[in-house]
Image: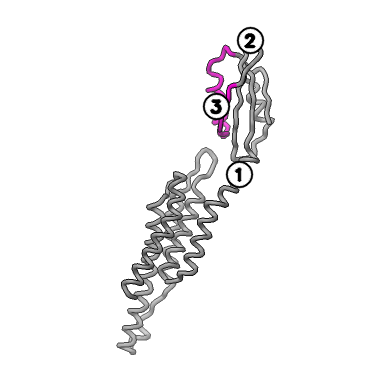
């Protein structure tokens, strides 16, 4: 391989791995721009080494035909080890927090970036570029579709009237939602026609299909609550 070929493949690995890593970086994920770029470049380097080893083996056999049975170059062995090794690296980005699993997408992108790096190093430019574009489309545009679908499915509005004598009601309610693995997206204070009673609206989101009735019943136990309305 010429120096220009090596340089071209390494630069392509930087560009494609960098694009995918940049998207992860913008989402503040454990593995971001640098990590994805290095994984892609590292995989490309391994592929280049493997090709160079094959070429060197062929050159030695051409010079010494008697060594043909003694020398072997398995082009798939090192490549397979990269895929396995990156699997362990990706596992390090997966976090289990209070029953929810985070980091699966980042772990997957690391594995896919490694596959792209191997393809680039082996010189499969068309496969690498098309695959890179498809991957970026999936994690940028299709991810938005997934988020929108989840928001529509699990975004709820809870309106609560409570006694004004409890100054910590909103803070305690937020803690209640958090304890039940429900995110509070927005809190809006509403006007009330009754003296001594305040009203507020919570926009909540849950990543799982929690039972509305169960949550409302738990909220209603609070002595400060007057009425609860949910949508």
Tell me if residue 46 comes above or below residue 67 in the rendering. above
Quadrant in the picture for the C terminus: top right
Q: Position of residue 99 (x, y in %)?
A: 54, 40
Q: Position of residue 141 (x, y in %)?
A: 55, 51
Q: Is residue 139 visible?
A: yes
For mark 1, does the 10 Å Cα neighbourhood hold few (<14), some (14 to 19), or many (20 or more) residues?
few
Residue numbers of the magenta segment: 164-189
Q: Which mark is residue 195?
A: 2
Where, by quadrant of the figure, is residue 220 drawn?
A: top right
Q: Is residue 16 left or right of residue 156?
A: left
Residue identified by numbered label 3: 174
Where, by quadrant of the figure, is residue 228 drawn?
A: top right
Residue at the spot 60% in from the left edge and 28% down from the top edge: 202
Element marked by disc 2? loop
Quadrant in the picture for the N terminus: bottom left
Q: Position of residue 48 (x, y in %)?
A: 37, 70
Q: Which of pointers 3 and 2 indicates the residue nearer the eye?
A: 2
Is 54 contained in the magenta span?
no
| N-terminal label among 3 and 2 | 3
């Amino acid at each position: 391989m010429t120096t220009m070929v090596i340089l071209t493949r390494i630069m392509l690995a930087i560009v494609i791995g960098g694009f995918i890593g940049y998207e992860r970086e913008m989402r503040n994920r454990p593995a971001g721009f640098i990590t994805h770029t290095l994984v892609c470049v590292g995989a490309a380097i391994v592929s280049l080494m493997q090709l160079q080893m094959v070429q060197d083996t062929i050159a030695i056999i051409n010079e010494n035909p008697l060594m043909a049975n003694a020398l072997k170059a398995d082009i798939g062995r090192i490549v397979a080890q990269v895929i396995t090794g990156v699997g362990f690296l990706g596992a390090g980005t997966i976090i289990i927090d209070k029953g929810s699993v985070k980091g699966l997408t980042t772990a997957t992108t690391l594995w896919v970036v490694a596959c792209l790096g191997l393809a680039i190093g082996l010189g499969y430019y068309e496969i690498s570029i098309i695959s890179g574009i498809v991957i970026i489309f999936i994690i940028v545009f299709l991810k938005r579709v997934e988020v929108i679908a989840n928001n529509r499915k699990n975004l709820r509005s809870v309106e609560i009237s409570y006694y004004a004598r409890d100054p910590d009601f909103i803070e305690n309610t937020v803690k209640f939602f958090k304890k039940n693995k429900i995110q509070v997206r927005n809190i809006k204070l509403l006007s009330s026609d009754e003296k001594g009673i305040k009203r507020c609206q919570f926009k909540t989101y849950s990543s799982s299909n929690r039972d509305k009735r169960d949550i409302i019943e738990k909220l209603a136990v609070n002595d400060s609550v007057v009425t609860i309305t949910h949508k």
